[in-house]
Amino acid sequence: MSNDVSIALASLALAVVLAWIKQNNDVTRLKEKIRSIEKTEEKVETMLLRLSESMSRLERALVKAGLIDID
């Protein structure tokens, strides 16, 4: 094999390894973002559940006080 072919193959191998490393870094970053989004989603769901429960208590109190009617 000539030096030119060896250099070309080494360059190609290096490019493949670097591309693989970049892809792994990108995948890791995306997985971290997904985990963060899922954690935020859980927080939002908890807050919405608490809000719904609070609204129900408020509604019951208003009905009990005779200030509103529920059909």
Image (cartoon, helix red, strand yellow):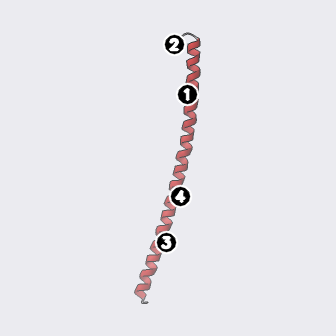
Residue extending farthest to the bottom is 1
Of the residues under marks 1 and 4, which one precedes in the sequence?
4
Residue extending farthest to the left is 4
* Residue 17, numbered label: 3
Q: Which of marks 2 and 1 is in front?
A: 2
Q: Where is mark 2, residue-wise?
A: 69
Q: What element carries label 4?
A: helix
- Mark 2, other Cα within 10 Å: few <14 / some 14–19 / many ≥20: few
Amino acid at dot 4: Thr
Instruction: Residue at 52%, 46% (x, y): give it.
Output: 37
Of the residues under marks 1 and 3, which one precedes in the sequence?
3
CA gap, disc 1 to disc 4?
Answer: 36 Å
Residue 9 sits in quarter: bottom left
Q: Where is mark 1, residue-wise?
A: 52
Q: Where is residue 67 in the image (x, y as percent from the top left)?
A: 53, 11
Q: Quadrant of the N terminus?
A: bottom left
CA gap, disc 4 to disc 2?
Answer: 54 Å
Instruction: Residue at 44%, 85% (x, y): give it.
Output: 6
Q: Position of residue 56 (x, y in %)?
A: 57, 22
Q: What element carries label 3?
A: helix
Q: Where is mark 4, residue-wise?
A: 28
CA gap, disc 3 to disc 2?
Answer: 70 Å
Of the residues under marks 3 and 2, which one precedes in the sequence?
3
CA gap, disc 4 to disc 3?
Answer: 17 Å
